[in-house]
Amino acid sequence: MSLSEQHPKAPAVPRSVEEFLNDAQHVAAFTTVRPDGTLHVAPVRFTWDAAAGLARVMTVDTSRKARNLLDAPGGRVALCQVHGFTWATLEGTAMVVRDPARVALGAKLYTKRYWSPPPSPPGRVVIEIEVDRVLHLNT
């Protein structure tokens, strides 16, 4: 599948939710599952690509969130952005991607959203979340 094509399970997202998800002043809580089954939650910056049905999180391959997904590729995750009583949660399956072109695309989208490039430490990867469910309130 081309990165610009929408995946078949991508849910339709109302315009108000789209605007909220693309508001750069917010961060999100990213939840992955550790190998022992417990949850790991970390604050992250992310990008939302509605056309592709993908959320992307820049990180390094040694981070806990990346290691969780490297241990269980395609695992379920949740990314929840909150502002007061307004929130949107993106759920789906995620993979750690090392492909230089896709990491570069993740960095480009991050730079566009946050007006500055993400850090570029050794081991930089992008986590791609294939979103199949969107929950929201007051958006």
Image (spheres, rainbow, N blue to C red):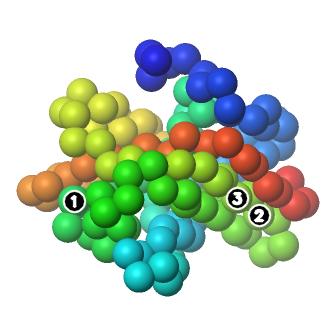
The disc labelled 1 sits on which kind of residue? Asp
Q: Secondary structure at mark 1?
A: loop
Q: To which quarter of the image does residue 135 belong?
A: bottom right
- Foreground: 64 or 88? 64
Q: CA distance from mark 3 to mark 1?
A: 24 Å
Q: Residue at x 83, y 43 (%)?
A: 16
- Give the residue pinned by disc 3: 89
Contact (CB < 8 A) between labels 2 and 3? yes
- Give the residue pinned by disc 2: 87
The disc labelled 2 sits on which kind of residue? Trp
Q: Secondary structure at mark 2?
A: strand
Q: To which quarter of the image does residue 12 belong?
A: top right
Residue 127 has which mark? none
Sooner in the amino-acid sequence: mark 3 or mark 1: 1
Q: Residues within 10 Å of mark 2 (few under 14, many from 20)?
A: some
- Across and down, in percent, residue 52 comes to 56, 27
- Give the residue pinned by disc 1: 61
- Across and down, in percent, residue 127 comes to 38, 49
Position of residue 27 in the picture relative to residue 15 (left or right): left
Q: Residue at x 29, y 58 (%)?
A: 70
- Foreground: 94 or 19? 94
- Across and down, in percent, residue 31 comes to 53, 69
Query: Does residue 1 sit above or below 14 in this rendering?
Result: above
Position of residue 82 in the picture relative to residue 74 (left or right): right
Q: CA distance from mark 2 to mark 3?
A: 7 Å
Whether residue 47 is visible here, answered yes or no, is yes
